[in-house]
Amino acid sequence: MTNDLLTVEECAVCDGGRLFVAPTSARDLVALEGSVHGGPNMLPAEHDVLPALAAALLDAGTLKRSKAAIREALAARGITIGFAASGDRTYFSGQCFPEDLEALLAALCECLSGAAFPEGEVANVKALSLGSLAEEKSDTRAQAERALAAHLYDPTHVNYARPVQDEERSVRLATRTDLLEFKKGLGVGGLVIAIAGDVTSASARAAVEKTFGKLGKGTTSVPVKHSNTKLPTAGESVISIADKANVDVLLGVALPLTMYDERYHAMKVLVEMLGGGFTSHLMQTIRERDGLTYGVYARLAGLESGADGSFKIWASFSPGRYAESVAKLREEVARFFARGLTPTALTLSKERMAGLYLVSLSTTQNLASALHSVGVQGRELAYLTAYPDLIRAVSIADLKRAAAMIPLDKLSLVAAGTL
Amino acid sequence: MARTETLSKAGVPGITFVRELGGIQEYRLEKNGLQILLIPDPASPVAGVMVTYRVGSRNEAIGHTGATHLLEHLMFKGSKHFNKKNKRTTFELLENKGARVNATTWFDRTNYYEVLPREHVAVALALEADRMQNAFITEADRASEMPIVRNEFEIGENNPSEALDKQLWAIAYQAHPYHHSVIGWRSDIEQVSIERLQQFYKDFYRPDNATVSVAGGFDTKEVLTHIKKSFGVHARPKAPLPPVYTTEPKQEGERRVVVRRAGHTNVVAIAHKIPEATHADMPALLLLSLVLSEGKTSRLFRAFADTSKATDVTAVCYQLRDPGLFTSFVTLAPQVSHDSVEKGLKEIFSDVAGRGVTAAELGRAKQSVRSHVASRRDGPFALLYNLNEEIAVSDWTRFLTFPEALAKVTPREVQAVAKKYLVEDQSTVGHFIGTAL
């Protein structure tokens, strides 16, 4: 483990919040990742765009200051802040110099609690959101992702993706009143903050208590996730988009698996072996042996808010070799599950994942992100250092149990491009 | 630190200590002229190794555009002592130990790197040394890798801004090799001969054209010993490096390009000619780019994103070895015309040139620089990558001196470079027009 991990401390803050502080060897740099309850999962589908719109507006004027005053004051001190929303949460992040941590936290709190959502700003963010959704219609990867999510999940599941046109309608209908109502739910409920870099635990804790301590209670619980009721079916669909030189392909299936399932770590290893890096089965065959793709990766998705997610493979293919490429992809996926779960391959993947984890934590930003994830997932701080051992503990039997969850004859394929 | 102290610390015959600045130690392998940079962080369990070659798409010409990048791919196909046959490839030996292994190609340089648990540094160095001169570079590997690189090209073509960017450079440059993008033209990727790639490898992959940098957790003496043992087998080449002697002719008027493709994305871009990275005007130009597009207080964000005219704005001041471009991109919101945004962009340039920037704007830009300077040392990869960019355009000490130069820039100097370089006669305007799907 990195020496920086040895100095991580966790403190309870703000009546139930979790604060992680990781002083590192980085100088003149403090990175912060945080979140509170308040995301699209908590709203009816027709209003699920509100958290993202609100996130885009949180720094666009508060009860105390104008948009320009907030943004100029932050920029003058070299402070950057950002907001986003997905799943159960509204996320915030920031970077600052060591002397400005309290100012950074105060600005985040001012935005979370005091955002005024001026009418003009609401109209602007709605217009930009509609612009981004319009661009998405000719984005091959985005279109494939949306179509696969719609195919895999029932419409009431948190991972279901509505058609772009539905989302556009919701954006058009969103009002300032809706946004103010949504913001009422943002407080210290579900608070998780991770701060890493040129910082001390004592100063960080004091600054968090001083600033976030003033926030309201917010939303204390998150909705219970119901399991996907849609049965897997082997579909294949093509989304035609003209003038595209590359085809984005997704092959996947929803899984009855959450990140708290005992098979979770084995599934992580399995997916890594199949398509986790250059040495994975798919990269070694579809790319290195057959030259059919620049990139082919497997991953787990949709597990972030504790829901049951999916297993999916992404690949990029040339339109002229599409049929051959897809056939080979399916063939190699089948071959991997039939013959690839060997002790040697497992050992290599586990070693790789453990090493890569160590390497990934060698930056302040990544360390803050990892700590924040630990908090959001409701895990103990010890998980940060125990993770490599959990990976190393996966056995062949575990791997086969995980593999048995994936119905290979029911993988759905979506391709988007000029076909 | 005193020179004698470092010399005695290193204590590896055949490797000469050159200097130490800002915690970065420079050495030279006497036998062949290899430059070595060490940035030790003894307590870290992670280290990074990067080899930077001073060769990029700048060194290509018509018929073999993209050769540097294709060659970069072939460098992973094996070398004399590290290959598939003996099961000692980069990926088997390093990625399987958790290393982040990759390579990147740019206008002026190519790099190969490994960020990895510190105990594997010696293997990374041995592998890099072997492929510096003993890579196979075979026709069979070219034939199998070409479709992969072509697919990488195709992925880029799916992105409207990237497609427009290629056209912008191609119109802005007529003679100089910055004319073509780093990935090259499709037909060259498909048809460049293995003999051309082998010659390219022979011409540029040599110790006196490379820098080996190691950052993070390692023992200095051990690493220098490994470097001497592995890279020291290579002789100093007698032939001079092939020069790039083409100079871009003076531009004498605005140039324009239109790309029409199906889709909902519309982009306006304007590129202006600027000098090389080492030019005295570069600090002010970089700060100008930050004033124009860094964050939500920037001029372009306020003019276009804050008024519902654009979903994205960027300005990039390219710092290259030869005179480069200062590009501004605006991705249009629906119903916004290209002409209105082009006009708005030109008005902003004109305003900066005529009225200058405020002290507050410049202050914000300098704070952003301070933040960037701190981030450059956050982990071995960031450190090596940023050093590598300085090596590509001049020498690594610019990593330290350039921020000092930025700190001294005044509002008047920013205005002066805007007036000097953001001029219509030196510009290339591009429109990406989305047509019906």
Image (spheres, coloured by chain):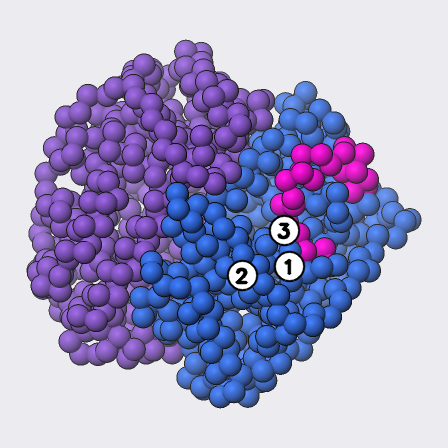
Q: Residue at x 21, y 79 (%)?
A: A65
Asked if the residue at tag 2 contacts the one at tag 1, i.e. Cβ–Cβ closer than 8 Å, the answer is yes
Q: Nearer the viewer, mark 1 or mark 3?
A: 1
Please report contact status of discs 1 and 3: CB closer than 8 Å, yes or no: no
Residue A228 in view = yes
Circle 3 marks a residue in which chain? B
Q: Write down the residue under mark 3.
A: B181
CA distance for labels 1 and 2? 9 Å
Above or below — where is A22 with respect to B315? above
Label 3, secondary structure: give it: loop
Q: Which residue is mark 1?
A: B171
Residue identifier under label 2: B430
In which chain is the residue bearing label 2?
A: B
Identified by mark 3, the residue type is Ser
Visual hue assigned to chain B: blue
Along the polypeptide, which appears first: circle 1 or circle 3?
Answer: 1
**How far apart are the alpha carbons under marks 2 and 3?**
16 Å
Q: CA distance from mark 1 to mark 3?
A: 12 Å
* Start-end of magenta stretch: B176-202
Image chain in purple: A
